[in-house]
Amino acid sequence: MSTPTLSQPSVAGTPQPERRTHHPLYAEVRSGPARWAALAAFLTLALPLAAKAAYWQGSWGHTQLQLHTAAVLLGGPLAAAAGCWQGGREHRSRTTELRVCGTRGPLAQFLVSAAPVVLGVLAGYVLAAAGALTATWPYVSSGRPHASLPAADATFLAAMTMGGMVVGRLVRWRLAAPALAGFAYVALALPTHQKSALRFLSPATTHGGGDALPVWWQPLAMAAWTAGLATAAVLAYAARRHWYAALPALAIAAAAAVPLVRTGEDMWHLAPAGKAQVCNDSSPRVCVNALNRGLLPEVSRALSGITSRLDGVPNAPTRFEDLHRASRSGEVELPTLYLGQSVVRGALAEPEQFAWEAAAALTSRDCDTFPTQRTDDAVRDWLASNSLSERRRQTAEENARQWGNATATADAKAGARALSHLTAMRDGQRRAWLGRYFATAGRCDVSGVPTL
């Protein structure tokens, strides 16, 4: 009896799992230049932004202005260089003949080759923009970011990459990429120092600082201008003999350029919140720009010593303003709240310095001579009454002694006596004296200024 044999299925007949085919773009994005373009774009934008973080954290406007400036002046040349390097890659790898024999048309081949670098640059920009906006969010007190601004910058970066790709295809020079980056930087930055209306065609040109917003159509027009030029260059290169295919893109770019040039500085306006004030209920009242509403408690706390000393004083100012327009009677301008200087990450950097400057604004006189300086200084130091004011007096007296300046030493001692006299007054007597003093505040006619 024979032993039955087990039949094995043929290996050749075994169905094999079907392999997924990926688009060539997938390989380029996964292992090609896209990763390095993304890393370079991110570091090029993130490192300068981080170095100046104190100057933009706490304000959406300043954050987006710094991000826009970095994207245009640093990201733009980098994007052009990355596109140029990718454009010359086929010459270096000697695949030009293979590309000519391909089944895709010239435009499709160009787009497939450019897409990885474009996506890499945009990915780096998006990461840097998201990081900057996230870093500002904990410290901002009003307003909101505007999506049209980063969208226009992203369009600009894509356009610079595509334009650089065209240059890389046409110029067979190994140093073409860095040379193009340098040229792009000069071409973008130089118009900002000109007075011609053509300077507004450069995306780097802004007006009004971080508190100004562009009109709604400005980012759209700038995106159409930059994208139109890049599209025209790509179509003219890909179409070759049919160069006239680029004319519609050029027409769009020209149509976008007209309002940019004609409108000029009027494309930017002060944010609505920048025209308003928020105030506390002290006497005198302390008011700050509505864009800085989150700073009002801290500013009020820094000036609490001054406002408490002025409470009930006749002729004293009625409010401190933060709009650089304190010209009406009873208004005094606050020290400027500069991001990165007096304000860092949503907080006053030096509250005592801020209070001293506010007291100095109360007692200043814009005159050619200063016959009442001793009295003005005494009032200023009594109103401030903090350690900074005391250190300044002690330093001035020590310097006068060390230099052997008898006049300066005598003035310092006389100033100390005047301050002691003002401090030693009874409350009612001092309020009456300060009432007479503030009746002449800011005037150069010092005949009515009471002495100490």
Image: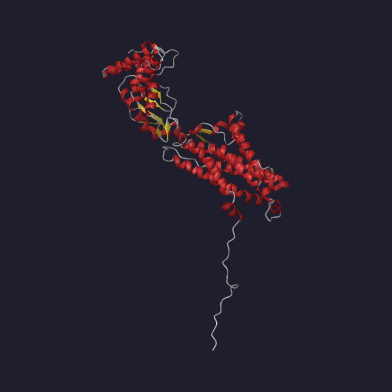
Q: Which colour scheme is used?
A: secondary structure
Please say whether residue 99 is visible from this viewpoint. yes
Q: In which quarter of the image is the C terminus?
A: top left
Residue 316 versus residue 374: which sits nearer the camera?
374
Residue furthest toward the bottom? 1
Determine which quarter of the picture holds residue 6: bottom right
Residue 270 versus residue 85: which sits nearer the camera?
85
Please say whether residue 283 is visible from this viewpoint. no
Q: In this view, does 283 lie to the left or right of 181?
A: left
Q: Which percent across, then down, holds residue 229?
A: 64, 41
Residue furthest toward the right? 241
Q: Which percent across, then down, holds residue 356?
A: 38, 24
Q: Which percent across, then down, holds residue 23?
A: 60, 56
- Count of labels in the image: 0
> Is residue 243 placed above or below 377 in the rendered structure?
below
Determine which quarter of the picture holds residue 168: top right
Residue furthest toward the top? 447
Q: In which quarter of the image is the N terminus?
A: bottom right
Q: Is residue 193 left or right of residue 426?
A: right
